[in-house]
Image (tube, rainbow, N blue to C red):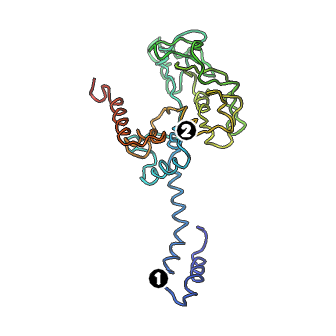
């Protein structure tokens, strides 16, 4: 409609409003101008909505929000406020798809040694450490590298204790990956024959170099890859007795059960209280007093540290 000449719109309005009454009127002119403005408004709206980054949309989808709620409650509000990146106090540099947090080189000495343990890998932003003044930095930087993520399980009841290569065989299997292959754009294979158990009440860590597929695997657990066309899964991921890679899987319910914590903060374009209550409202909690109590409790937990000057 943008390319339609205004004279064509004028002739159309003349035929349906002016000619039947045999005289010109202000209403006819107003209708003609409104029709001319429709494609301009639509195109501007489309451009504004496209400014809302996919990281914010993904965060809403990862909470289990239906598509229409993501559009109305997150995308529209982000475009309407003129701050599509989220809360103005929490701007994030860069953009693109969010990732899982890497283990930095100088943090890796905290991990256990061993042939089957997590392999140390120097990330690009840590490479200057390789040429640092300390011998222990050099030893950490040049340890054996691996091109695929390693697994480690530790019990949350034993803080700070993590057994390398442990599988937690004494715990029940809550989620199990069986011969998983994943393809970007239908042809570019990113995961090859992955099989691993995720045990109940244990922490499973995926540790490996940047680009080895850690985030790709995590995003398979709640089908976040389905937000993009032509991505393809092969194999099975068993959760609660069913294969969640099935075409019949309810993705909204799945994402509400299997969440994802992104590396970068992804606030929605709403108040802090509304951000905290958003997931609760998705779960059907509408009671104002209960929401207020949950919000207060969350803020107290977030502020219970030295940053807020409390003990």
Tell me the SS state at disc 1: helix
Q: What residue is drawn where x is 51% and y is 58%?
A: 45
Under circle 2, the secondary element is: loop
Per the rendering, the mark at residue 26 is: 1
The numbered disc on residue 190 is: none
Please tell me which residue is depicted at 41% across the width and 52% down the height of the picture: 81
Q: For the C terminus, give its image quadrant.
A: top left
Q: Nearer the viewer, residue 208 or 12?
A: 12
**Which residue is pictured at 55% across the width and 31% down the height?**
258
Query: How many marks can you see?
Result: 2
Viewer-nearest of discs 2 and 1:
1
Whether residue 167 sits left or right of residue 185 in the image: it is left
Q: Quadrant of residue 294?
A: top left
Labels 2 and 1: the sequence-earlier one: 1
Can you tell which mark lies on residue 97?
A: 2
Q: Residue at x 39, y 42 (%)?
A: 287
- Give the residue furthest to the bottom: 22
Disc 1 packing (10 Å; few <14; some 14–19; many ≥20) = few
Structural crowding at the residue carrying mark 2, measured as other residues with C-alpha within 10 Å and reported as few (<14), some (14–19) or many (≥20): few
Judging depth in this view, the residue of 58 and 242 nearest the camera is 242
Of the 4 image quadrants, the one containing the N terminus is: bottom right
State whether residue 163 is above or below residue 277.
Answer: above
**Residue 141 in the image: x percent, y percent?**
52, 17
> Residue 87: x percent and y percent?
40, 44
Can you give x and y, in whole percent of width and height, for residue 251 in the image? 60, 39
Pinpoint residue 84: horizontal percent, then vertical percent: 46, 48
Measure the alpha-carbon separation of dots 2 and 1: 51 Å
Horizontal side of residue 115 vs 103, given as left or right:
right
Front-most of residues 84 and 59: 59
Looking at the image, do the residues carrying marks 2 and 1 touch, with CB atoms under 8 Å apart? Answer: no
């Amino acid at each position: 409609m943008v390319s339609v000449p205004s004279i064509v719109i004028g002739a159309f309005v003349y035929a349906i409003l002016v000619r039947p009454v045999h005289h010109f009127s202000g209403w006819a002119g107003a209708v003609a101008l409104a029709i001319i403005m429709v494609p301009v408004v639509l195109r501007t709206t489309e451009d504004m909505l496209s400014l809302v980054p996919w990281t914010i949309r993904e965060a809403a989808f990862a909470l289990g929000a239906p598509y229409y709620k993501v559009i109305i409650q997150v995308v529209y509000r982000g475009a309407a406020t003129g701050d599509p990146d989220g809360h103005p106090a929490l701007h994030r540099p860069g953009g693109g798809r969010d990732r899982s947090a890497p283990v930095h080189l100088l943090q890796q000495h905290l991990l256990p040694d061993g042939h089957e343990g997590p392999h140390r890998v120097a990330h690009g932003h840590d490479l200057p450490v390789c040429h640092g003044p300390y011998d222990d930095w050099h030893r950490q930087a040049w340890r054996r590298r691996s091109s695929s993520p390693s697994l480690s399980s530790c019990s949350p009841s034993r803080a700070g204790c993590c057994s390398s290569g442990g599988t937690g065989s004494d715990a029940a299997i809550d989620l199990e990956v069986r011969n998983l292959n994943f393809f970007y754009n239908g042809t570019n294979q990113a995961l090859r024959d992955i099989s691993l158990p995720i045990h109940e009440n244990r922490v499973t860590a995926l540790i490996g170099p940047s680009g080895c597929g850690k985030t790709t695997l995590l995003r398979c657990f709640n089908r976040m890859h389905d937000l993009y066309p032509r991505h393809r899964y092969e194999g099975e991921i068993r959760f609660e007795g069913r294969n969640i890679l099935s075409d019949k899987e309810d993705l909204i319910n799945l994402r509400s059960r299997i969440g994802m914590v992104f590396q970068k903060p992804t606030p929605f374009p709403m108040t802090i209280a509304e951000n905290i209550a958003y997931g609760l409202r998705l779960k059907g909690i509408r009671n104002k007093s209960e929401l207020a109590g949950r919000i207060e409790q969350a803020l107290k937990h977030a502020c219970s540290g030295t940053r807020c000057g409390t003990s």
